[in-house]
Amino acid sequence: MHDQTIFSYQTPSGQRVEILKQSFPSSRKRPVKKIAFVSGIHGNELEGIYICHLINKFLKELKKGNPEAFLGEVHIYPTVNPQATASGTRLWPFLSIDFNRQFGNSTGDSPAAKCAEALIKDLKLSADIVVDFHASNLHLKETPQIRITEGFHKKLIPLSVHCNVDLVWVHPLSPMFKSTLGYNMNQCKVPTLVIETGIALRINQKFANRIFLGMVNLLHHLGVIATNDPPPQVNHPIIAHPSQVVSIHSEHAGLFIGHTDIKKNTTKGETLGEIVDAKNGKTLQEVTATENGFLFTIREHPLVYPNSLLYRIAKDILT
């Protein structure tokens, strides 16, 4: 393995910040496939950083014991927004810029815009396939899932089924997606999977370990690595198209008290939680499931206002 600095910049305080890439070369002159793992675009999303650590550790041990197993190349970009990661903040520090809105046709002169330009340029040269790890915000808990923008689904779903996620959510194109890393890499004909799991500023080891096994399986499936050991077994995900996902929102401001965790067998009418007025002891809203299906998003933050997102259900899907 070798490290490479793909971009660096100096902060107003004089500190030098480097964006690093960790590379595992192929044992062949012409690698079968080149794959890249990216994490830390948002500094409060720590689960992807931990998954990259697990991948790095696994590949180091494999390289040490069986270097010929590397038929392809692996590149890991473990923290592409290191200042935000160090402070545990979602946005690029000092400038309050969302780094995942700096890709595409951005012509900004900020360090974030220049770093985005350097990252996407390096990924185009280094990868045939990209996996972009994300977590949820502090308000919501997400089951391990891959999110695919409609239009890219025919190419990405066949890759997604090897990743050990619970759900593949195909959602409509929105203008805000056009400035993200995932959208722009897919537009450049580099298949890019956006994996979301867990919750911000937390690491759910169960979720992370599942995704790690999925990534090892994906490496085997792509022919990037080949060993005598069989690849990990993975679950086949639910495939949810836009019309198959419903959201449940709050009708009142108050304290949200959830009564259930993520589950695959929610039934219509089931009580999922309640919104209460703590001052007078009243229940303002009993929150119930609007469909049968897979409850894959749940609210973790108890303070809610009218129209706050509480749950998402992939309805009536069994496989």
Image: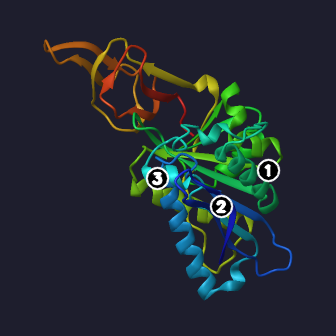
The alpha-carbon separation of the residues under discs 3 and 2 comes to 21 Å
Viewed as shown, does residue 301 lie left or right of 113?
A: left
Examine the rendered structure and indicate whether residue 201 appears above or below residue 212: above
Q: Distance between the residues labelled 3 and 1?
A: 25 Å
Residues at marks 3 and 1 touching, judged by CB atoms closer than 8 Å: no
Q: In this view, does 182 lie above or below 24?
A: above
Q: Determine which residue is flagged by label 2.
A: 218
Q: Which residue is outermost to the front?
A: 13
Residue at the spot x=60%, y=73% of the render?
230
Q: Which of marks 2 and 1 is nearer the N terminus?
A: 1
Q: Which of marks 3 and 2 is in front?
A: 3
Q: What residue type is labelled 2?
A: Leu
Does residue 257 appear anywhere in the picture?
yes
Reading the image, the residue beneath label 3 is 46
On the image, numbered disc 1 is attached to which residue? 190
* 75 left or right of 301 in image: right
Quadrant of the drawing holding the C terminus: top right
Q: Circle 2: is it few (<14), some (14-19), or many (20+) Cα within 10 Å? A: many
- Res. 14 image quadrant: bottom right
Quadrant, the N terminus = bottom right
* Res 172 seen here: no
Three-letter residue code for mark 1? Val
User: Of residues 218 and 56, which is closer to you in this image?
Assistant: 56
57 on left or right of 6: left
Label 3–label 2 contact, CB within 8 A: no
First of labels 3, 1 by sequence position: 3
